[in-house]
Amino acid sequence: MREVSRLYPDKNTELYLYDKTGGRSDIAKSALEREGYKNVHNEGSINEACEQRGIE
């Protein structure tokens, strides 16, 4: 969490999370929200994140 706080000290920064299946990004989203981050989005799996952005 220290690394995130160092890279993104503004807790209003929009953060988009994804991983292979979406489960770990959901855990990370919850942890970031507990630390006070307000704009955290779980994009789900890498495939879902790419699909949402029109990336093949």
Image (cartoon, rainbow, N blue to C red):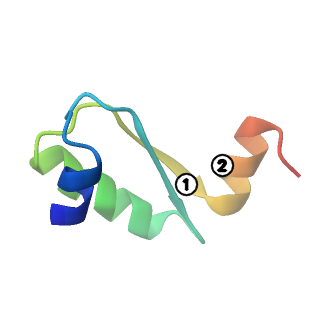
- Which residue is outermost to the left? 35
Residue located at (10% from left, 49% from top):
35
- Which residue is outermost to the top? 12
Residue located at (41% from left, 69% from top):
24
Can residue 1 be seen in the rendering of this structure? no
Q: Is residue 16 left or right of residue 6?
A: right
Tell me where residue 50 appears, x and y as whole percent.
Answer: 74, 49
Q: Is residue 44 left or right of residue 37?
A: right
Q: Give 44 or 6, whichever is nearer the viewer.
A: 6
Crowdedness of circle 1 by 10 Å Cα count: few (<14), some, many (20+)?
A: many
Crowdedness of circle 2 by 10 Å Cα count: few (<14), some, many (20+)?
A: some
Three-letter amino acid code of the residue under disc 2: Ala
Tell me where residue 43 appears, x and y as whole percent.
Answer: 54, 47
Quarter of the image where one finds residue 51: top right
Residue located at (23% from left, 32% from top):
38
Tell me where residue 30 appears, x and y as whole percent.
Answer: 24, 53
Can residue 12 be seen in the rendering of this structure? yes
Residue 49 disc label: 2
SS class of the residue under badge 1?
strand
Q: Tell me the quarter of the image containing the N terminus.
A: bottom left
Question: Closer to the N terminus: mark 2 or mark 1?
Answer: 1
- Which residue is outermost to the right? 56
Three-letter amino acid code of the residue under disc 1: Gly
Q: Please give the residue where the numbered disc 1 appears in the rendered image.
A: 44
Cβ atoms under marks 2 and 1 closer than 8 Å? yes
SS class of the residue under badge 2?
helix
Q: Is residue 50 left or right of residue 17?
A: right
Q: CA distance from mark 2 to mark 1?
A: 6 Å
Residue 26 disc label: none
Tell me where residue 10 appears, x and y as whole percent.
Answer: 21, 33
